Amino acid sequence: MKFNLTTVLLLIIIVLGILYGMKSCENSKINEKLAEEQNLKLVLNDSIHKVILKNGEIEYTKKSLQDNVDFLQKNISSLSDNQKALLDEVKSNKQIVSAMRDKMEVILSNLNQNTVVALNDTTYEFTDSTKDIEYNIIVSGIKPSTQPKLDIQNLVIPNNQNVSFQFDKTKGNPVSVSIINSNPYVKLDSVDSFIIPAITKTQTKPNIFQKTGKVIKQTKDEIIVGGIILCILKIFKLI
C-alpha cells in the first residue's frame, strides 16, 4: 500500500489522538489525587470561626471534610479524635451522605443577683426569667453558725440551633458547616463534619462556561475515538 502525504498526516493524527487520550486520563487521576490531598490539608488547618449576627445570635463555621471513606481511612493518622469518631459512625452506615459531630457547652458567667437579708431570715429564693435563662434557686442556712444549702429548683437555658452546609466564597468553593445558636450562654467547643461523596459548586450551581466545559469533558473521548475512526476509514478509502 502506498501512503501519500494525506495518509501520513492522518496516521499522525491517529497516533497523537491516542497519546492525548492516554495522557489526559493520566493527568485526570493525578489532579484528582492532588485535589484530595489539598482539600484534606485545608480542612485540617481550619479552625472554628465565630460571628455575632445582627440579631444577636452567634454563628460558628468550619470547613467540612469532603472525600470518600477509603481515602479518609488511609489518612486517619492526620485526623483528630473527633474526626476519627465521626468517621467510625459514617463507616457503620453506608447510607450516610453527610454527618456532623459537635460538642456544646453551657457557660454561665456574670450571673449576679443582689439582695438584702433580714436578721431573722434563714432562707432566700433567687428567681429570674428571660429569653435566655430561667431559674429558681433557694439558698437556706444563711444565718451564722449554720450549714448553708443551695437548692436548684429549676434551671432552663433555651436554645434554638440551626445547622446548614454551604459553599465558601474562597478558591475552590469548599463546603463549610454553619451552626447558629440563639442563646449566648450556649458555646460551641468543637465541630467536625463530612460530605460523602465530595460535591463542588460547579456540580450543583454551574455557570454557562462550566456547563459547556462539562459537556466537552464528558464527550471528549467519544470525539477522539470518532475522529480516529474517520481517519482510518479515510486511509482505506472506505468513505
Image (cartoon, grey):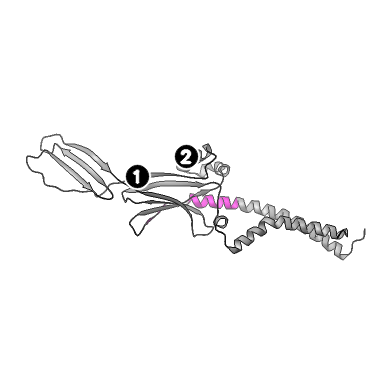
Q: Which of the pair 180/28 is nearer the observer?
A: 180
Q: Position of residue 230 (x, y in %)?
A: 81, 59
Tell me if mark 2 has few (under 14), some (14-19) or many (20+) residues whose alpha carbon lies within 10 angstroms of its own: few
In the picture, measured across the screen, residue 29 lies left or right of residue 224, that is left
Q: Is residue 213 visible?
A: yes
> What is the magenta range?
33-51
User: Is the C terminus in the top left, top right, bottom left or bottom right quadrant?
Assistant: bottom right
Query: Which residue is denoted by mark 2 in the rendering?
Result: 85
Q: Main secondary structure of the magenta part?
A: helix
Q: Which of the pair 187/181 is nearer the observer?
A: 181
- Assess whether residue 108 is covered by the magenta stretch: no
- Residue found at the far bottom of this picture: 5
Going by the numbered disc 1, the residue's amino acid type is: Glu
Residue 124 figure quarter: top left
Q: Secondary structure at mark 2?
A: helix
**Residue depicted at 20% across the width and 45% down the height:** 127
